[in-house]
């Protein structure tokens, strides 16, 4: 069972934390949040007291360029069923591999 953790970006970088899974959560209007899985801990990435927001996938690659990431995925939750009055459906979640490689 995982322990819920509030990961501070500066701590992750300073300690050269090895990340087992970096989960990019994709939202409308180019907002991306990051959930980390490190050992038996998992949780959201923060900048100080606020969730760390990214506005492009390249910003995420740049931020984690010097950090070892074993696996990365992107998850997109579709709100469309809720918008038209249908019940929330687990199948509205799309999870795909996310490349951390820089596009040099």
Image: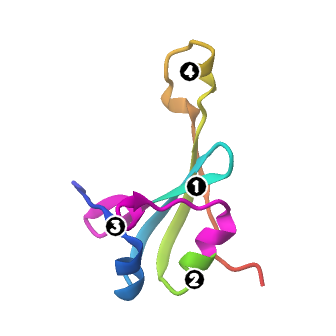
* Secondary structure of the residue carrying numbered label 1: strand
Q: How far is mark 4 from mark 1, CA to CA?
A: 21 Å
- x and y percentages locating residue 71 in the rendered image: 50, 69
Q: Earlier in the sequence, mark 1 or mark 3?
A: 3
Image coordinates for residue 34, horizontal then vertical, percent = 48, 60
Residue 33 in view, yes or no: yes
Compared across the picture, whether 101 is left or right of 21 comes to: right
Position of 57 relative to 62 (above/below): above
- Distance between mark 2 and mark 4 Cα atoms: 36 Å
Q: Is residue 33 above or below residue 104?
A: above
Q: Residue at x 61, y 20 (%)?
A: 83
In magenta stretch: residue 46: yes
Q: Which residue is mark 2?
A: 65
Q: Secondary structure at mark 2?
A: loop
Residue labelled with disc 3: 7
User: Considering the numbered disc 3 on the image, is that residue within a helix, a strand or a loop?
Assistant: strand
Residue range (magenta): 35-61
Disc nearer the start of the sequence (3/2): 3
Residue for point 49% across, 22% down: 88
Q: Which residue is mark 4?
A: 82
Give the label on residue 32, or none.
Answer: 1
């Amino acid at each position: 069972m995982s322990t819920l953790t509030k990961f501070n970006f500066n701590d992750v970088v300073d300690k050269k934390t090895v990340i087992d899974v970096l989960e990019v959560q994709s939202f409308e209007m180019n907002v991306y949040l990051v959930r980390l899985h490190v050992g038996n801990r998992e949780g959201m990435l923060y900048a100080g007291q606020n969730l760390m927001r990214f506005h492009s996938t390249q910003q995420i690659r740049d931020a984690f360029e010097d950090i070892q990431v074993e696996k990365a995925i992107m998850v997109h939750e579709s709100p469309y069923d809720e918008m038209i009055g249908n019940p929330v459906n687990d199948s509205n979640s799309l999870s795909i591999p996310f490349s951390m490689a820089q596009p040099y």
